[in-house]
Image (tube, helix red, strand yellow):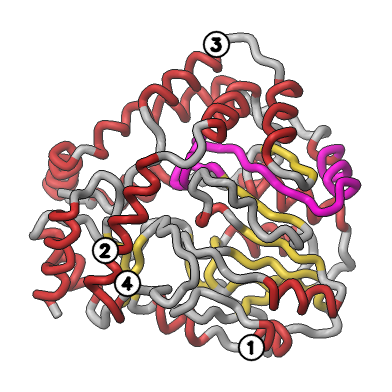
Amino acid sequence: MIPRKRIDIGCADLASGLLGCVAPGNTTAMRHAIESTWDTRASFACLSVRSGLDALLAVLALPVGSEILISAVNIADIPRIIEAHGLVAVAVDIDMQTLTVSPATLERACTARTRAVLLAHLFGSRMPMQGVVDFCNKNKYLLIEGCAQAYTGDAWRGERAADVSLFSFGPVKPATALGGAVLSFRDAALRDRVRAHVARWPMQSRAAYFLRLSKYLVLAPFGNYFVFGALASLCRLLGSTHEKLVSGAARGFAGSDFFVRIRQQPSAPLLQLLRRRLAQGEQSSALRRIERSRLLQRLLGAQCVGRQGREHKHWIFPIVHSDRDALIRHLAKRGFDAAVSASSLGVIGSPPGAMPTSDATQTFSQLLYLPAHEGMSESDIRQLAASVAAFN
């Protein structure tokens, strides 16, 4: 069975990370090496995007009840962090064909309590941001953008006019270091305040990072088609599904001690591996993934989410179908691992009275993810498209 996604890290990188856990390393030097080469804007390397956003909101100290407009499609931890600071997350709808948020939608959603806008580039697309920048400048809102899903190792560093750009290198992200994030700030003074806040947090345990690397070293063989198929069969025999195992392995901050776990500084070995991954640049594997995904998009046409997006790097490959569960079972019989869930993304609810998120909600009620990665051949892609077409 072809897995829906591969973890974007090789055994050599994992081995390097494990070695770093037992070798001396200077956290300050590693952080400086990353920040000095990452962006022309002021940069800050931290444990995760969740950590960076939490620290940013703590430093901003917005009045209790202030609203932040966020993409309706997001991870549940984002409103959780916003609400922990006494703020209100207001979801704004997304055009799911272009994967953009229009200034008109933002205008309708904002109120006298709005203070910031936080939008994510989704599924590997890169949203044109000039209209959003103009909207934020006009209203004097802070503009934060989530760039993790659209990064491929190239020179792209997000929207230059954004106040803060967030790049994550967690387990399912491109160029992953199984953790770590880099934030770019338009205002160096704000970056310095966030850095000073994080400096009060405890350091991530080397042992904890060693265990995370070891787990993914064990999981690495499951990217093989035959091994993954055997795992899926074994799970069925045991009365479970491989979906639970895959989703659990990819979850970065599970557990009840969420804020304890994100409020840590990154360890030296994590920063060392992150620096190594960033130095590798855009890999041929990323280019193959984009090529395979574009072929699948051409073959499937109207079913593809975001097919009208201006620039797309295809981090994951979502489509819509009115009977998605039956389609998933149909594809599994033909050796393709499709699923309703391939990440922590979902539709975020809004407070009563907020604008509806009808496009995002309707799309996600029919959405499933297909495999479309660098490990697949052109023949695999054509067989997958034919299998989808045969079900339709």
Vertical comparison of 347 with 262: above or below: below
Residue 251 point in image, percent of width and height: 46, 47
Which mark is first along the chain, 4 or 1?
4
Q: CA distance from mark 2 to mark 4?
A: 14 Å
Residue 263 sits in quarter? top right
Disc 2 to disc 4: CB gap under 8 Å: no
Instruction: Name the foreground residue: 257 vs 79.
Output: 79
Instruction: Name the foreground residue: 92 vs 66.
Output: 92
User: The residue under label 3 is which amino acid type?
Assistant: Val
Q: Which mark is residue 295?
A: 2
User: Which residue does the numbered mark 4 point to in the structure image?
Assistant: 319
User: The residue under label 1 is which amino acid type?
Assistant: Met
User: Which residue does the numbered mark 1 point to in the structure image?
Assistant: 355
Which mark is first along the chain, 4 or 3?
3
Q: Nearer the viewer, mark 2 or mark 3?
A: 2
User: Which residue does the numbered mark 3 point to in the structure image?
Assistant: 22
Q: Nearer the viewer, mark 2 or mark 1?
A: 2
Residue 305 point in image, percent of width and height: 38, 74
The residue drawn where x is 28% and y is 61% is: 370
